[in-house]
Amino acid sequence: MAEMSEAEAQILRQRIETLRLEHRDLDDVIDRLAHDPNIDQLQIKRLKKRKLLIKDLIQRLESDLIPDLDA
């Protein structure tokens, strides 16, 4: 894979930060809903799945920021 430009890297870092914010927001929502006895457990499960997908995407994007080293 070709090296990315600094502009591309900056866009990637901004995307990662946006995803981190969404991840934290989901964490807050899940925590609040978990304390509500009337909440649908399926909704919490879906939010947790979304949170995990975001975490995986963040890790993948962070990996893309690491330059490839020639072996």
Image: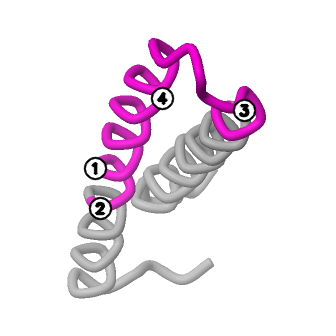
Q: Which residue is under mark 1?
A: 21
Task: Report, in whole angstroms, how far the alpha carbon at label 2 lies from the one at label 4.
Answer: 18 Å
52 to 64, vertically: above or below: above
- Looking at numbered disc 4 in the image, what kind of residue is underneath it? Ile
Mark 1 and mark 3 lie on one chain; the one further toward the N terminus is 1
- Quarter holding residue 3: bottom left
36 to 20, vertically: above or below: above
Q: Are marks 3 and 4 in contact (CB under 8 Å)?
A: no
x and y percent of residue 46 in the render? Answer: 71, 42
User: Nearer the viewer's eye, disc 3 or disc 2?
Assistant: 3
Residue at 59% across, 23% down: 38
Q: Are marks 1 and 4 in contact (CB under 8 Å)?
A: no
User: Which numbered tag is attached to residue 18?
Assistant: 2
- Looking at numbered disc 2 in the image, what kind of residue is underneath it? Thr
Mark 3 and mark 4 lie on one chain; the one further toward the N terminus is 4
User: Which numbered tag is attached to residue 45?
Assistant: 3
Q: Nearer the viewer, residue 9 or 33?
A: 33
Left or right? Give the position of 57 relative to 32: right
Q: Nearer the viewer, residue 15 or 21?
A: 21
User: Nearer the viewer's eye, disc 1 or disc 3?
Assistant: 3
Q: Secondary structure at mark 3?
A: helix
Considering the whole magenta stretch, tell me its main secondary structure: helix
Q: Are marks 2 and 4 in contact (CB under 8 Å)?
A: no
User: Nearer the viewer's eye, disc 2 or disc 4?
Assistant: 4
Q: Which residues are magenta?
A: 18-44
Mark 1 and mark 4 lie on one chain; the one further toward the N terminus is 1
Q: Which residue is under mark 4?
A: 30
x and y percent of residue 19 in the render? Answer: 38, 56
Q: Are marks 1 and 2 in contact (CB under 8 Å)?
A: yes
